[in-house]
């Protein structure tokens, strides 16, 4: 896996530009605007912070991020950037990050897809963190986002084939 990851990250760094990375950063996995149904009854959430933390630990190891302290938070939709289902904030000097994922009660996905999609969001945000040291161009984040989306989707697909 490392033999695959190193050349891939080198390729992505060449494609992504040559701007200096900042010491702190943020990224978000986005989607189209959800249409949340509001009712008097709150459905039980399908996710727990322990579950999200478990995914972080698993993918942190696989992505070589064990030296990072990464916290998990499940948040309501208004606490995320517009159209985002998850995001990550990090500090390179402190090697600390927080992954925030959308509460399942705000999701418009079928219940059967929410757990898998949230794990994909965790992987996606951790790939952003893995790329945080690369010299990326902040004026062209769509290139980074495309690379991260493809990598995280491929990694999760490999996991599901086991």
Image: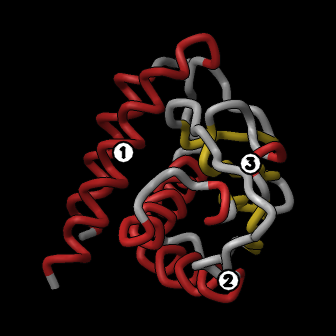
Q: Secondary structure under badge 1? A: helix
Q: Say whether disc 1 or disc 3 marks the residue closer to the N-terminus.
A: 1
* Mark 1 surroundings within 10 Å by alpha-carbon count, few (fewer than 14), some (14 through 19), many (20 or more): some
Query: What's the CA distance linking mark 3 and mark 2?
Result: 16 Å
- Res 104 label: none
Task: Determine the CA span between mark 1 and mark 2.
Answer: 31 Å
Return the residue nearer the eye: 132 or 41: 41
Q: Which residue is mark 3?
A: 77
Residue that badge 1 annotates: 9
Whole-Å distance between the Cαs marked 1 and 3? 31 Å
Q: Write down the quadrant of residue 113 in the picture.
A: bottom left
**Residue at horizontal 73%, vertical 51%?**
38
Characterize the local packing of mark 2: few (<14), some (14-19) or many (20 or more) Cα atoms within 10 angstroms.
some
Q: Are marks 1 and 2 in contact (CB under 8 Å)?
A: no
Labels in figure, total: 3
The residue at which mark 2 appears reads as 48
- 156 above or below 25? below
* For residue 150, side relative to residue 36 (left or right): left
Q: Are marks 3 and 2 in contact (CB under 8 Å)?
A: no
Please tell me which residue is depicted at 22% across the width and 76% down the height of the picture: 160
């Amino acid at each position: 896996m490392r033999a695959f990851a190193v050349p891939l990250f080198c390729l992505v760094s060449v494609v992504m530009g040559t701007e200096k990375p900042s010491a702190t950063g943020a990224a978000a996995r986005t989607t189209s605007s959800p249409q949340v149904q509001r009712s008097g009854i709150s459905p039980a959430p399908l996710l727990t912070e322990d579950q999200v933390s478990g995914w972080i630990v698993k993918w942190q190891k696989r992505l070589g991020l064990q030296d990072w302290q990464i916290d998990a938070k499940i948040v309501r939709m208004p606490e995320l950037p517009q159209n985002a289902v998850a995001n990550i904030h990090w500090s390179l000097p402190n090697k600390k990050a927080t992954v925030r994922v959308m509460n399942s009660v705000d999701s418009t996905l079928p219940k059967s897809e929410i757990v898998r999609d949230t794990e994909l969001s965790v992987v996606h945000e951790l790939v952003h963190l893995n790329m945080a040291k690369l010299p990326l161009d902040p004026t062209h984040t769509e290139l980074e986002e495309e690379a991260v989306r493809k990598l995280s989707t491929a990694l999760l697909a490999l996991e599901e084939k086991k």
